[in-house]
Image: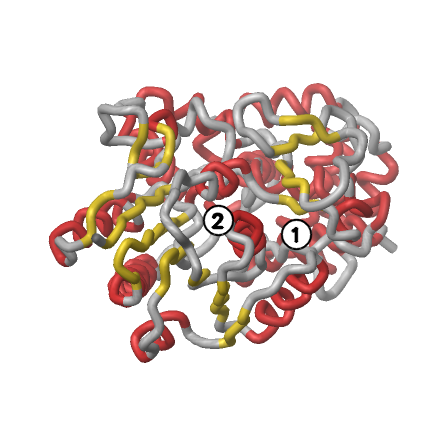
Amino acid sequence: MPTPARLHVAHALHEVFGEKGRVPDIWDRDLGEDAHLAQALLGLCLRRWGRLQAWVTPQLKDPSRGVPLGTRVTLAMGLAQLAWLPGVSNHAAVNESVDLAADRDLGFVPHKGLVNALLRRAAKDRAALAAALDALPATLDRPAAAERALRAALAPHQAEAELETLWTRLQRPPRPAFRLLVGEAPEGLTPDADLPGCLRLADEAPFPRPWLEAAQGMVQDRSSQALLAYAWDRPVTRILDACAAPGGKTTTLALRHPGAALTALEVHPRRVARLRQTLQQRGLEAQVIQADAAEWLETTDATFDLILLDAPCSGSGTLQKHPEWPWLAHDDLPRLTGLQRRLLAAAADRLAPGGLLIFAVCSWLPEEGEAHREWLAEARPELRPAAVWPAALGADSDGATTAFFRPHPLRWEGEGFQAFAVRRH
């Protein structure tokens, strides 16, 4: 029977390529030490799915008949282990893949012999297998959605010629970033040289799960930390986090503005429960409301001195952290951009005089960020740009600060974000 690590990877691949769903954040939570193998294997399969499938096709007697998903998953996992995980033995890579092929839910039983034959043949010269796979075009691993995201990331910086460089960088698993909440940071976390308060995991250091579970620190991407390091010196007594779960940005807002009344909105019941638990563990207070943010904003008469609207988006800026993103369905962009504009308009109406509104998306696509910024400037002329970030992190700035947060994707290590800040006189 396959190990739990391989079973978890197979389930995740079926979720992505069978259901077009994202890999859940806690997919490997119960694997213990085996999580390292599972994470490495899943990352390889997702980042090199196209070339793994391209290698298999000419090995088949009749490629035109197609290959069931269970067989494609099983072969991809076996080949990835043989080519790029030298610590995995031939026996483990081949035999456990054959066992997966025999699983009626995760494999395809009639292809058990095919999987066995192809992997045993590949195992005879693992170096040659790796060389053959690496020699296949990188474009096989990035469908049209990825191409568009990369071009959108580079175009504002006139760096379209660096597409291959950016793609190569995004294929390396990201280094986690952390924020200290109480006490001292554990061994293995070092200060980020360019972002005050940010901690990075040192090479070969263990992931600090006990420290996180004790609510002494939290994982937070560098871009999120830089986004929330906005410069703002006006009084803040009422804060709204309009799309709050899982709670990282809510936590930062609470710590930045102690004593302010903080309202956090979230529509999904499970995420609401997680948000409340997170805040409780961290000893923070907020009024958590389960509600559709757009509907709530359109019906409330409350106003706020600070509104953070980290809106639902395509997630195109999370390519490095979520290597499954290129393979998902991306047919809901019109719905997302419509929702973003509705949320932005409603949030703008709830901004108190002298208040600050920050709109953010973890996306490089211009229609999810820059287009909304231009629309708001025309639709709400009473709102003025608020230059709250260092110019190096933004665009359209001739001074030391910028109102448009859009870090250069080749010079900034962190998720791809677009954000803009406006203030009401």
Q: Name the residue furthest bottom.
A: 299
Residue that carries the numbered disc 1 in the rendered image: 71
Quarter holding residue 405: top left
Q: Where is residue 107 in the image (x, y as percent from the top left)?
A: 71, 58
Which amino acid type is marked by label 1?
Thr
Which image quarter holds the N terminus?
bottom right
| Secondary structure state at the residue bearing disc 2 | helix
Q: Residue at x 16, y 57 (%)?
A: 380
Q: Quadrant of residue 178?
A: top right
Task: Give me the C-alpha separation between circle 1 and circle 2.
Answer: 18 Å
Q: Residue at x 83, y 33 (%)?
A: 88
Residue 327, labelled with which disc? Answer: 2
Q: Is residue 276 above or below residue 43?
A: below
Q: Alpha-carbon neighbours of circle 2 within 10 Å: few (<14), some, or many (≥20)?
A: many
Res 112 seen here? no
Q: Which of marks 1 and 2 is nearer the N terminus?
A: 1
Query: In this orientation, which residue lies closer to the viewer: 268 or 75?
Result: 268
